[in-house]
Amino acid sequence: MANTLLSIQVIPKTPNNEDSYPYVDKAIEVIQRSGVKHQVNPLDTTMEGELDELLKVVKDMHEALTEAGSPSVISQIKIAHNPQGISMSKLTEKYRP
């Protein structure tokens, strides 16, 4: 079982104040390619896995956005870590029909 949940909202600066959504899409592509379990939400994306693995995904996201032309990236991150195990489904099951 995974030991970490990490929710991230990326806020990329765009070169000429363009729409940031294409950059956010690139960040989500990095998550998808990583193979970690994740859930895209309206304002953030939550990933489930091992802490080191998820932090590497965050690093890869930032690198991908700067390579795509974003001069800088701010990320807001929330981390829930439990060495005994944690999962998105376990935390939200009582709210699901």
Image: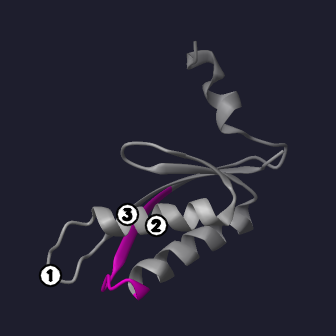
Q: Earlier in the sequence, mark 1 or mark 2?
A: 1
Q: Nearer the viewer, residue 85 or 30?
A: 30
Q: Categorize mark 3 by other alpha carbons within 10 Å: few (<14), some (14-19), many (20+).
A: some
Indicate whether 29 appears above or below 70.
Answer: above
Total numbered labels: 3
State if disc 1 and disc 3 touch (CB < 8 Å): no
Residue at the spot of label 3: 24
Picture colour scheme: one colour
Residue at the spot of label 1: 16
Q: Residue furthest top?
A: 97
State if disc 2 and disc 3 touch (CB < 8 Å): yes
Please state the horizontal and vertical placement of residue 66, each as a whole percent of the image: 40, 84
What are the residue bounds of the magenta stretch? Answer: 67-77
Q: Categorize mark 1 by other alpha carbons within 10 Å: few (<14), some (14-19), many (20+).
A: few
User: Residue 73 has which mark?
Assistant: none
Q: Amino acid at mark 1?
A: Asn
Residue at the spot of label 2: 27
Q: Does residue 61 appear to the left or right of 25 in the view shown?
A: right
Residue at image location 69% in from the left, 56% down from the top: 36
Q: Amino acid at mark 2?
A: Ala
Residue at image location 41% in from the left, 78% down from the top: 65
Is 69 covered by the magenta stretch?
yes
Q: Does residue 77 appear to the left or right of 88 in the view shown?
A: left
Which secondary structure lies at badge 1?
A: loop
**Separation (CA) of disc 1 from disc 2:** 19 Å
Is 84 covered by the magenta stretch?
no
Q: Amino acid at mark 3?
A: Val
Residue at image location 26% in from the left, 66% down from the top: 20
**Separation (CA) of disc 3 from disc 1:** 16 Å
Residue at image location 48% in from the left, 79% down from the top: 64
Please state the horizontal and vertical placement of residue 15, each as a whole percent of the image: 21, 83
